[in-house]
Image (cartoon, rainbow, N blue to C red):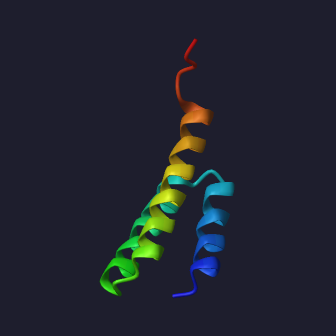
Amino acid sequence: MDIKLEKENIQSHVDKGNYHAGINLAISAMNECRRNKDQAGVDEFIDFIRTIVDRLADEFGSRKN
């Protein structure tokens, strides 16, 4: 898998506000890395999922004082 290309594809969904697709695609990519015993790829997609969730929380979550 070309991780850079996959992340660009996922990011295009997130940029359009389609967080559901972005997270699902990122999980699928993470699982492919896991099946291929690519721990660095797994870690990279976990970090990417966190970034997506943080953006989702910033946009829609309650503001904390």
Residue 20, compared with residue 34, is above or below; it is above
Q: Quadrant of the C terminus?
A: top right
Residue 20, compared with residue 25, is above or below; it is above
Q: Residue furthest top?
A: 65
Q: Estimate the x, y position of residue 27 in percent, counting from the top left.
A: 40, 66
In percent of the image, x 53 and y 28: which residue is there? 61
Q: Residue furthest left?
A: 35
Q: Estimate the x, y position of residue 21 in percent, counting from the top left.
A: 49, 61
In percent of the image, x 45 and y 60: which residue is there? 46
User: Is residue 43 or residue 64 the one in the foreground?
Assistant: 43
Left or right side of 10 for 30: left
Q: Estimate the x, y position of residue 55 in percent, counting from the top left.
A: 60, 43
Left or right side of 50 for 12: right
Number of on-image labels: 0
Q: Estimate the x, y position of residue 63 in percent, counting from the top left.
A: 58, 19
In percent of the image, x 53 and y 22: which residue is there? 62
